[in-house]
Image (spheres, rainbow, N blue to C red):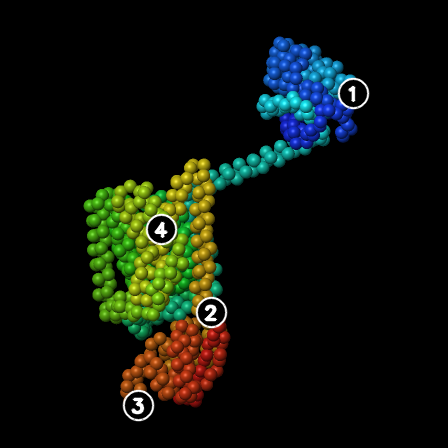
Amino acid sequence: MSGTEQDSPDPLAGMATVAVWRRREQAYSVVVSPDDDELEPENGLHATDDRTLLGAERNGPTGDGSNGNGSNGNAENGNGSNGNGSNGNGPNGNAENGNAENGNAENGNAENGNAVHVNGLHTAVGGPSANGSPDGIHGGFAHSQQAGLSAMISLSNADPWGPASAEPATGGSSVITRPRPLIPPDQVQLQRALVAGGQGRWEQLEGWGRRLARVRWLPLTAVLVAQTALSLRLVWSNSAFTDEALYIWSGRLEWEHWLHGAPVPNFPSYFSGAPVVYPPLGAMAAALGGLYAARILSLFFMLFATVLLHGVTRRIYGRRPANFAAAIFAGLGATQFLGAFATYDAMALMLLGLATWLSVCAAQSRLAAQLPLIFGAASALALADAAKYAAALFDPVVVVVAGLVAWQYKGRKHGVITVLALLWLLGLLLFLGVRIGGDSYWRGINTSTLTRAHGGSSSLGIVADSFGWVFIAVILGLIGCAVAAVRQNGLAAKLCALALAGAIALAPANQARIHVFTSLFKHVGFGAWFAASVAGYALASLADAVPAVKKHKALTVSACAAATGILVGALLAQTHFASWPNTTTLVSRMRTILPDHRGNILSADNGNVIEYYLEDEIAGSTFYGTRFFHYQDPNTGNSLTNLAAYTDAIRHRYFSVIILSFSDTRTTDEAIERDIRTYGGYTQVARLPYRVSGTSSAFRIWVREGSG
């Protein structure tokens, strides 16, 4: 190094600083008329004319401008004598953004090793300018001013990342640059460190994400955790629904009958599911932790149903569609609702899923394992039908899917054999079940399911409400069928997608046929379990339909679609779980009334709730509802039903306590209230307000006067 370079107190300018200077020079250029002979100084520095400022683009004594040729060599961003270089390399020395002969210089120019250090840049003193204008800044300037202007001019034209910019026009205008303060090198290094640190952290996060993405069980676990949280928020949000109370109470009686031989009512004659399948399990859970434990049992059933859906979809379409299918199903309002509802619905749906999974496994297994798996699938299907008779509506879907998957993997003949084997085993098991159950079970199946009374609900309204509850599964299911028709090989695979997606229409179509709205919200969840498989396939196919560079964005869009379904489902589940009145106050009030008024109790839709909560207080009492009532007149012996029966019973003061809610059976409740006012003999002892779905009403309690 030269002595001047060693003595310089200023740090060298880095590449980032040079680039910043160049951008600032271009941004703050001022165009001045060429006619001005004398230019006013700016920022304390004298301006120069065209020859001075454009000297960097003209010919030097031994070279040809910036990015040009010298007489004996080439240079980029400068000229040299007897040397050539890119960004300044000479035969006997090196220079960055400059040229040197027999000497070294960095960010500057030197000839014969003579350079000064100005603002972190080296420039020749008393020699040719690095920009080819040795005379442009000579006259009238001190050495320090000449060096400073040379450094700034060199800096404004240097481009450390590539060739210099295009040459300016040599017309009649001058460009004057305003000097800007240099960024301190320590701040430049700090900025570089911050950028490098941010990039390092981002790369680290990306690495973690890639490692997590390779954990196969992680997406399903996240879905199950979310499903658990969504259902648990409902478990403690309301008191027992009348069906929940009925099944848990009947389960208690079944246990007493099995253990102690206690008599039980004829539940099979009117239950819509076998009273010996789910009710004992629900009663056992309630014995351990009350109503909330029974509801959590349903949550376990629904979580298992989600796992089975994932397994079925993974075997048919792959792992990614299975993850999306699980997310779609877990987010449905019916799924969240059934996961917090202590009835046989969750158990029946889980058994349907188990039957489907076993049948798909059988279709893809070796011959030795097929028969046990098919028998297990038929057994699970029969048990699902016994737990909830309406589950039989989806038996054809399970059988058809099993046959189509077997056809797809092992041929049409094997598919036909699978269907016939499943049907034969299922029919045999159901026949044995009905024969063992007897007439009372057949009567219950017939009245509650096969020949269910028609209602007065609009068929169009039933279909519209059903679509609103599961619209995401319907839309994506249709898209999945279209994708399968294009991408899946073989007729069996296309028909399988159609069968799975079409299952979602079975429950709305059946209930629209009989104009019954009751339980529709639960039943659409059964069909949605099957349709979610094809819906997940549709979301996963979006990533394959776009270029590879947009794959992650497509997956993000698919995840957002699933998340939207979860939010809508959460709102629907909350609304339906609050659709019956909270009976906590009613139960507390009845606890004080029943000990003194035992006997026949008329309770509108809440008798089962009172029987469940007040098991000890109701000893010696019989509960009647407001949906159906049969009464025989004690004087005439005439048999009466419904409104006529209520009127005659009140006239004879048959009930010791009357509880009306004025909600689902409002017309009947109002008629009974008129009969009470007409015939008397009862005193109203309580009016307990409540609010359901934006509607205000009240429980009203009457007790019989005297000993009656």
Q: Nearer the viewer, mark 1 or mark 2?
A: 1
Q: Are marks 1 and 2 in contact (CB under 8 Å)?
A: no
Q: Amino acid at mark 3?
A: Asn
Which residue is pictured at 25% across the width and 70% down the height?
443
Q: Quadrant of residue 50?
A: top right
> Considering the numbered disc 3 on the image, is that residue within a helix, a strand or a loop?
loop
The residue identified by callout 3 is 635
Q: Secondary structure at mark 2?
A: strand
Q: Residues within 10 Å of mark 1 (few under 14, many from 20)?
A: few
Look at mark 4 in the image and give the residue it sits on.
477
Image point (45%, 56%), residue name? 568
Q: Between tags 3 and 1, which lies in front? A: 1
Residue that label 2 marks? 692
Given the image, on which type of amino acid does mark 1 rest? Phe
Q: Which residue is mark 1?
A: 141
Q: Are marks 3 and 2 in contact (CB under 8 Å)?
A: no
Residue 411: x percent and y percent? 22, 43
